[in-house]
Amino acid sequence: MKAALVTGGVISIIGTITSLSILGIIITTTGVKAVDTAAVALTQPPPEGWPVFWHKGVVTNKTTSIYNPTNEFIFPSIFHAGRWLNTPRAEWYIYYAPHDDPGGIALRYADSLEGPWTEYPENPVISRTWGDHYTVPHVSSPDAVWDAEANGGNGTMRMYFHGSNSVTRWATSADGISFTYGGIAVENAMVGPAVTESSYARVFRHPDPRSTFRWAMFYMGNERDNIRRIRLAESIDGETWTVSPGPVLVPGPEEGGNVSGGSLWRWGGQDYIIYHASSGKIYARTIDVTLRQVGEVPIVLYEGRGDKSDDRVASPVVVEENGSTYLFYEKGSRLKATIAWAKMAAQK
């Protein structure tokens, strides 16, 4: 049978399970039983050794940024340029973008994840117009990965980005600056008429050794009910994608009406999907290697300090360097955000 989340009289399909809870009644395939809804926790305590991140600073200073068309930046993507590129400008690249029109994928680079970050002077590296391929109001939400098997085994960077909100695209690059357009990765029509947005993708190597797919993607799918869910797509080559029919994650009572920015993170031998929500917090839920079995109750991974400049945190990316663990994210209210970073406590 299908499970449904009931909120304010609206029923949202979650997935196929053997029981359904509505107003304190569990309806199963074999019968009905009552439960105590007050005992259902909105969040769960983190496991032992769970990282505590401390805000350290801002990557994108709006007042000094060369490319700053809308005075807001979102969706950081960290790329280890020193590992993969032949002649990188620095050890680490960070891609980000404005959300509002015209958007534009921007680049900064640094020799340490702690900065200082130098802005590429000719941003954006990808704009809202690209020859005959597309002309859209904006492009945003960059995510860069390295595919070592592509290009005859020489490898290539593959950049994913949306533009407009209904389409996530991809492009390739040998240097992380000059890109060749690839095509469409996912779009609304791949799921059906109920989906109105397909954006904010994170791409990673598929964690399931038994899967025929090499790559996986979490992305945000908005629907006609205006509830944003996290969906799953899988690919053999990182270019042609198959979308799973049902969402991976729907917002619960803790998260509010929307979830987005899903990314895969492994900690303490366990895989997690980390993401942000309407609540303004960053969460983690356990997930299995098939990327389909998700923990029922979220763990709070990070939340802002509560002042006006940090009342919302979103789009998490966790990176490790030299034994230190870092969290990159966007902070600040939507459409006024900037890129920030935090570091795990008890590390040098």
Image (cartoon, rainbow, N blue to C red):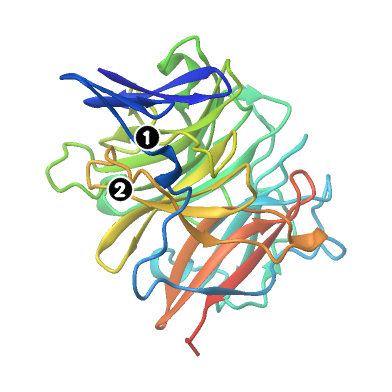
Q: Write down the quadrant of residue 31 in the picture.
A: top left
Q: Find disc 1 in the rendering and name its residue.
A: 248
Residue 56 vs residue 235, the one in the foreground: 56
Please tell me how crowded label 2 is: few (under 14), some (14-19), or many (20+) other residues with Cα within 10 Å. many
- Where is residue 72? Give x, y as percent: 78, 50
Please tell me how crowded label 1 is: few (under 14), some (14-19), or many (20+) other residues with Cα within 10 Å. many
**Residue 176 can be seen in this image:** no
Residue 336 vs residue 62, the one in the foreground: 336
Instruction: Give the residue furthest to the bottom.
Output: 348
Relative to 297, residue 200 above or below: above
Instruction: Give the residue furthest to the top.
Output: 193
219 to the left or right of 228 = left
Residue occupying image coordinates x 69% and y 33%: 128
> Where's the N terminus, which quadrant?
top left
Q: Find disc 2 in the rendering and name its residue.
A: 287
- Where is residue 225? Give x, y as percent: 58, 18
- Where is residue 198? Give x, y as percent: 52, 27
Residue 196 vs residue 44, the one in the foreground: 44
The answer to whether mark 2 and mark 1 are in CB contact below 8 A is: yes
Residue occupying image coordinates x 67% and y 72%: 117
